Image: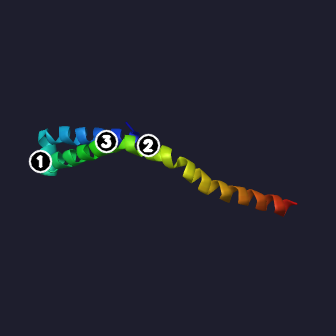
Amino acid sequence: MTKLSKFFLLLSFSTFALSLTGPGSEFAYGGLKPTGAVLFIVFFITNLLSKEIAVYDKEHLPEKQMKTAPAQSEQGLRNVTQHA
């Protein structure tokens, strides 16, 4: 689990637990339970997609490195020619 998914899980449980208390249900007028449910759904989606995101990043990392490598080498060549 990533930090973001842990954050959503913690926030969803805390809003749901707060909605079960008397002051929490009076304060938010019943809005904490749906908020907790939506945050739990967001946690579930991020948890499901975390493996797919890792695979995607692993597949496309060489492409990203190849795109940035020529730009970095050109910038290095410019610095060398300017100092010479």
Q: Nearer the viewer, residue 70 or 44?
A: 70
Label 1 belongs to which residue? 26
Q: Earlier in the sequence, mark 2 or mark 1?
A: 1
Q: Nearer the viewer, residue 7 or 64?
A: 64
Quarter holding residue 3? top left
Q: Earlier in the sequence, mark 2 or mark 3?
A: 3
Gap in angstroms between the C-alphas marked 2 and 3: 12 Å
Residue 52: give x, y in percent of width and height.
Answer: 38, 44
Label 2 belongs to which residue? 55
Which element type, helix, strand or loop, lies under badge 3? helix
Contact between marks 3 and 1 (CB within 8 A): the answer is no
Which element type, helix, strand or loop, lies under badge 1? helix
Q: Earlier in the sequence, mark 3 or mark 1?
A: 1
Q: Residue furthest right?
A: 84
Quarter holding residue 74? bottom right
Residue 61: give x, y in percent of width and height.
Answer: 53, 48
Contact between marks 2 and 1 (CB within 8 A): the answer is no
Q: From the viewer's perspective, is the residue at label 2 or at label 1 nearer? A: 2
- In this picture, is 81 found above or below 24? below
Contact between marks 2 and 3 (CB within 8 A): the answer is no
Q: Amino acid at mark 1?
A: Glu
Residue 41: give x, y in percent of width and height.
Answer: 24, 45
Q: Residues within 10 Å of mark 1 (few under 14, many from 20)?
A: few
Q: Amino acid at mark 3?
A: Leu
Image quadrant containing the C terminus:
bottom right
Numbered tag placed on residue 48 in the rendering: 3
Which element type, helix, strand or loop, lies under badge 2? helix
Q: From the viewer's perspective, is the residue at label 3 or at label 1 nearer? A: 3
Relative horizontal placement of residue 33, taking residue 73 as reference (left or right): left
Name which residue lies at 22% across and 42% down.
15
Q: Amino acid at mark 2?
A: Val
